[in-house]
Structure formats: structure tokens, C-alpha cells
Image (cartoon, rainbow, N blue to C red):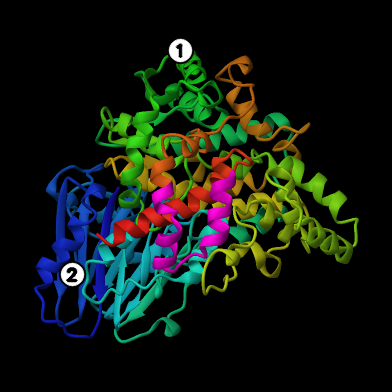
């Protein structure tokens, strides 16, 4: 795991390129504290900066930016190629005479690009990555991002300079960067509590979509560059439906366990200490159980607990750990420990981000880093195997709502909105006027049903959630929701949350369930083996119960959350009041003060729980304050 940044331009600057690239690298030193390097070619207008967190091949032979053996390519790479040993064997078996300098996956990747080209190499990889590759022969820059979006990659033109990198804070160092906030993206942020790809919080900068790459020549503008997919989630869904897994229950369970085990055998390879997060839930317990099965030594596992019973899962994690025999470390977090993290959040997250579980995620990463450099997680089980509650109740509710003619529902919704409903009733009024099942789900998962009432001067752009019907045909509502979450919420919330929180502690995280082969298999498994008798993740649970007793797992899902609602009424009240003051909101000019002040007062007075809406506004306000420093 590392971080990189760079620029590409034919515009001349009177600056020290080496010093500039080093400063861009230092801004993300948390992503790579072990070493830093830079490379530039002034005549070509290209510069690359890299920070290294050494995981595989700890020697200097793994340093980046790295030049290929022929000198044609220079790479800056963030991530891990789990099958790089197998790729080396393929290269060596091709008859080429290769003299390796070390055993890093970066060197393997470079040689693959030399021999196979861009698209074939990307398709041959098993791993997570963001790549900047300079082709000196074609005078072309290639940017690429892994299939599921595990690793971040921002890119865009400011003042005739292409800027790119792992985090926005590195791009901001370049003198061409212009910090113009995109109000349209801000509206999307309020709806989701994250900025969905391809947008970013800044005008002119976007996120490269997962499973895609771009080729950029000197002098090109954004309009001239095509985003090219090398892997398509929608095609995976179609292929899964066209060729479903034909086996009985045992055969499906066997196939899934085998594929996850193979994924783990690759992801457990590292030249540094490795462990796993363990919450005691289905997904993390499964990953740890299969890890322990493969390991001759106790796996190091980590969890944090809370004294508030409604938020604590540490006792369940401990029970699973004892059964599996892991080397378990737990720590109980006091409210002050969590509250102390909040001032750092605008530095940890380079654009506004408001999933409050970012706080415990940071703390468990901090705990793990004391003993390991790599931690595996159980993320993605819900999206791939039907674990979230809406997959069970949303179809039932929509089937009833849609029987009422849309004009009548909209009249009813308009009439009800004038009444002082709050909480769940208010949410129901918001979704009552949904025009389709897609719109229904979009409103269901929105924090602000209409963010334009709060954001000044914005127009909300289209996202996958309201354009999916044009590119994705899925008859099952449950599977459609799972597909949407896997391509939106998982990528731009879950993976962002974990990547930034872990990287703030210089900890690499790996997600075995996002091995693309697991994803492809998951979409071949029939829905009735994912959601059965109103319970999600049936097939995943059946794999788990081969290793952990059912009674240790079956309980209501709590999630990785904190009591943010009560904290906003208590220890965070003064901090929040300062950020949400009417005079401040008016002076900054991004939000209409009235709706925000109204929900703030209703929340503080205990009339309703508006914590998710407020947390989004507060995280933007705190982030905005950080940008002014």
C-alpha cells in the first residue's frame, strides 16, 4: 500500500520540479512512511511522486517510481497484485530472458506491461491498485484503477495541467490547482454523506471509475479522453445470470468456500506482520476462520468495544476468537477517545465524508497498527450476498406503495409535508412520491431527500442510482439494490472509509471478498441461496458454520457505529453549534441557514433524530474550516 501523485502538461512553470514533487509526496506521507521517490522528464512535461509502505520486497529493489528494464515505462503504483508470482512464471515461460532486480509486484507489473500491453495486463491481475504509467515511446500517460475501486485515484485538469494522485491533498500542492468547490457535487454529498464517483468536491477533478483506465497524450483536454473499461460490473451480472452456478446447496457452499480460501491464500502473503479485524459478525468471522485454518500460528485479530451496550460487539468477537484460537487484542473505547478523533477527520479525509463509523474504523486501525502492517477485513459480504435490511423490507413496501396511482401518492405526499411529521414518518412521506422502484430506493438511502433546499446555487447531477435503468436490466429488485450498493455505497463509502482511516495509521487493508473471482462467483449464485426465509447472506453463513458454531453468530446486526445522536446533544453540542451558527453559514455562502438551523434545533431538543443529516453538514463545515488553514 502506498500513495502517488503527479502532473502532465506542456505548460512551463518556473519552479523546482524535484522540490515540488517531493512536497506533493510529503503531503501523503502517511500512505507511505517507509520511503519516498520522484521522477520527472521536463521535456515531456511529466512528473511522478511516490510514497512507499513496504509490504512485499522490503529492499530498495521495490522503490518507486520504477523504470522498466527496457527504459520504456515508468510506474507509480499503489496497491497489491496478489497473483504477481504466477504472473512472473507466465513471463518466464514465454521464452524471454529476464533478469529480475527483486521480487516486488511492481517490477512484475512493469514487465507485464512491456510484454502484454495495457489491457491484457490489467485483465490478468488479481489485486487492488491505482496506477500511473508513463510510456516514453508513445509519449502517453496511462491511469488505471482496480475493478472494484479499492484504491483511490483522482484526476483532472486545472489551468492546463493534468493533476492526478491518490488523495486530493497532494494535488493541492501544485501551483496550478484551483480550489473551487463544486456546489453540484456538494448537493450529491448531502444526499449520500459521501461524494459519489466520478465526481469530487472540486470542480475539474474527478475520480477514475473502478475497472477503468485512460490514455492521455500531451495537450489533450478532458473532452478528448475516453474512459475505457477493462472489467464491467454490469457484464459480470449479465454473465452470472446467463450462466448460473448449477449445483445443489452443498455444491454451492463448497464452491464459495474454495474460492474465498484461494483468495485468502494470496492475500495472506506479505513480508511484514499481518492480521485481521474481527467484529464477531458473519463476514469478519468467516474471513478470520478461513485464515486461521490456513495458518500454523494464531492469527492476530483486533476489535474495539464500547461501554454502551447497544453499540458493543466486542464480547461476540472475543467468543469467536476463543473458539478459533486467534491471538486477540481488544480495547474498550471511552467517549473521550472517540471525540478526540473528530478534529482530525478533515485531515484524514481529503474531501467531505460523513459516515460516523469512520471514527471506530480509525481507532481499530490505530490499534492494529501497533502489532501489524497489514489487516484483512470482511467488507463486501452485505453487498454481494444480500445482508442489508432494505433487501428484505424494501420490495415488500414498494409492492404496496406502487399499487396506489402516482398522482394520488404525490398529492398525499404534498399534503402531508405541511404537517409537523418527524423521524420515520417524515422519511415515509419523502418516499411516498417515488416514481419508480429506482427512485424509491434512492430516496430510501438518501440522508437529505432534497439537498437543493439546503445547498445554495446547486443543480444535482445524475448518478448511477437514477440512470441504472438505461444500462442495467435486473428483474429482481433485491439484486438490483445489491448491484447499486456494490457500485456506489461500497465503493464511495465503505472502501473510502477504510482506506483513509487505515492509511492515516500507515496500515494496509485487504478485502478478500473483493477478489474479482469471488465477485464473479457471487453473481452466479441464485438469489434464494443469498436471501432465505427473510435472512440475508445464507450461503456465506453456511460456509461460516463449518468453522464457527451457529450460536456464536446468530444475533441482531449492530453495525460498526457510535452514539453520534446523543453526543450531538451532549459533548459535541458546543462544537456543532459553532459550525452551524447562522452567521457562519451566511458568511460562507454554501448553505441556506434556515433548514439547517431548524433540524439542528429539533435534534437538540429531542424532537427527532437528525444525526445523519447533521453529521453530513458538520463534516463539510469542519472540512471547509481545515481548507482555510
Instruction: Name the residue at 54% across, 32% down.
Output: 283
Residue at the image point whose x is 69% and y is 46% from the top: 422
- State the SS at label 2: loop
For label 2, the crowd category at 10 Å Cα-Cα, with few meaning under 14, some 14 to 19 and many 20 or more, is few
- Please give the residue where the numbered disc 2 appears in the rendered image: 71
Q: Quadrant of residue 310?
A: top right
Report the magenta residues as a range. 577-602
Residue 601 among magenta residues: yes
- Report the quarter where the C terminus lies: bottom left
Position in image of residue 464 (x %, y %)? 61, 64
> Foreground mark, 1 or 2?
1
| Residue 322 marker | 1
- 302 in relation to 446, above or below: above
Q: Position of residue 571 (x, y in %)?
A: 41, 35
Pointer 1 or 2: first along the chain: 2
- Looking at the picture, how far across and down is residue 286, in whole percent? 53, 28
Amino acid at each position: 500500500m502506498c500513495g502517488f501523485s503527479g502532473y502532465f502538461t506542456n505548460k512551463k512553470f518556473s519552479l523546482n520540479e524535484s522540490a515540488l514533487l517531493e512536497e506533493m509526496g510529503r503531503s501523503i506521507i502517511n500512505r507511505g512512511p517507509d520511503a519516498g521517490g520522484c521522477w520527472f522528464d521536463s521535456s515531456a512535461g511529466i512528473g511522478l511522486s511516490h510514497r512507499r509502505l513496504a509490504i512485499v520486497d522490503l529492499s530498495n529493489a521495490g522503490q518507486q517510481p520504477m523504470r522498466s528494464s527496457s527504459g520504456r515505462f515508468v510506474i507509480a503504483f499503489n496497491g497489491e497484485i496478489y497473483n504477481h508470482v504466477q504472473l512472473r512464471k507466465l513471463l518466464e515461460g514465454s521464452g524471454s530472458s529476464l533478469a529480475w532486480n527483486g521480487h516486488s509486484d511492481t517490477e512484475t507489473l512493469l514487465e507485464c506491461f512491456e510484454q502484454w500491453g495495457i489491457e491484457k495486463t490489467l485483465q490478468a491481475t488479481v489485486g487492488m491498485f491505482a496506477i500511473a504509467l508513463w510510456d516514453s515511446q508513445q509519449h502517453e500517460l496511462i491511469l488505471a484503477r482496480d475493478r472494484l475501486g479499492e484504491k483511490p485515484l483522482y484526476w483532472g485538469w486545472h489551468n492546463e495541467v493534468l493533476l492526478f494522485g491518490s488523495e486530493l491533498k497532494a494535488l493541492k500542492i501544485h501551483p496550478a490547482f484551483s480550489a473551487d468547490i463544486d456546489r453540484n457535487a456538494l448537493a450529491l454529498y448531502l444526499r449520500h454523506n459521501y461524494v459519489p464517483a466520478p465526481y469530487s468536491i472540486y470542480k475539474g477533478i474527478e475520480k477514475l471509475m473502478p475497472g477503468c483506465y485512460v490514455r492521455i497524450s500531451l495537450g489533450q483536454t478532458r473532452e478528448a479522453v475516453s474512459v475505457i473499461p477493462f472489467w464491467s460490473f454490469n457484464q459480470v451480472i449479465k454473465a452470472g445470470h446467463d450462466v448460473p452456478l448449477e449445483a445443489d446447496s452443498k455444491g454451492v457452499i463448497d464452491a464459495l468456500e474454495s474460492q474465498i480460501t484461494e483468495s485468502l491464500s494470496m492475500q495472506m502473503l506479505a513480508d511484514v506482520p499481518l492480521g485481521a479485524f474481527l467484529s464477531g459478525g458473519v463476514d469478519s468471522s468467516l474471513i478470520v476462520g478461513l485464515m486461521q485454518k490456513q495458518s500454523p500460528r494464531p492469527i492476530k485479530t483486533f476489535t474495539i468495544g464500547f461501554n454502551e451496550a447497544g453499540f458493543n460487539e466486542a464480547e461476540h468477537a472475543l467468543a469467536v476468537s476463543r473458539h478459533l484460537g486467534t491471538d486477540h487484542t481488544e480495547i474498550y473505547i471511552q467517549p473521550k477517545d472517540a471525540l478526540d478523533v473528530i478534529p482530525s477527520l478533515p485531515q484524514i479525509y481529503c474531501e467531505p465524508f460523513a459516515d460516523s463509523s469512520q471514527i471506530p474504523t480509525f481507532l481499530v486501525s490505530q490499534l492494529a497498527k501497533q502489532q501489524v502492517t497489514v489487516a484483512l477485513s470482511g467488507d463486501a459480504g452485505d453487498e454481494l450476498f444480500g445482508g442489508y435490511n432494505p433487501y428484505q423490507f424494501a420490495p415488500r413496501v414498494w409492492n404496496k406503495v406502487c399499487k396506489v396511482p402516482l398522482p394520488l401518492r404525490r398529492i398525499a405526499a404534498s399534503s402531508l409535508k405541511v404537517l409537523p411529521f418527524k423521524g420515520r414518518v417524515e422519511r415515509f412521506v419523502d418516499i411516498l412520491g417515488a416514481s419508480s422502484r429506482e427512485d424509491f430506493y434512492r430516496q430510501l438511502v438518501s440522508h437529505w431527500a432534497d439537498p437543493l433546499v439546503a445547498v445554495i446555487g446547486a443543480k444535482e447531477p445524475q448518478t448511477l442510482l437514477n440512470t441504472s435503468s438505461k444500462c442495467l436490466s435486473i428483474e429482481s429488485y433485491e439484486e438490483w439494490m445489491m448491484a447499486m450498493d456494490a457500485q456506489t455505497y461500497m465503493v464511495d463509502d465503505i472502501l473510502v472509509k477504510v482506506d483513509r482511516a487505515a492509511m492515516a495509521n500507515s496500515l494496509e487493508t485487504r478485502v478478500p471478498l473483493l477478489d474479482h473471482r469471488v465477485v464473479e462467483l457471487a453473481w452466479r449464485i441464485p438469489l434464494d441461496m443469498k436471501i432465505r426465509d427473510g435472512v440475508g447472506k445464507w450461503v456465506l453463513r453456511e460456509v461460516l458454520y463449518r468453522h464457527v458454531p451457529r450460536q456464536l453468530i446468530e444475533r441482531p446486526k449492530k453495525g460498526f457505529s457510535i452514539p453520534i445522536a446523543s453526543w450531538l446533544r451532549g459533548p459535541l453540542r458546543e462544537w456543532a453549534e459553532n459550525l452551524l451558527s447562522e452567521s457562519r453559514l451566511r458568511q460562507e455562502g454554501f448553505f441556506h441557514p434556515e433548514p439547517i438551523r431548524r433540524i439542528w434545533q429539533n435534534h437538540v431538543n429531542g424532537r427527532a433524530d437528525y444525526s445523519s443529516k447533521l453529521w453530513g453538514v458538520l463534516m463539510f463545515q469542519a472540512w471547509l474550516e481545515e481548507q482555510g488553514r
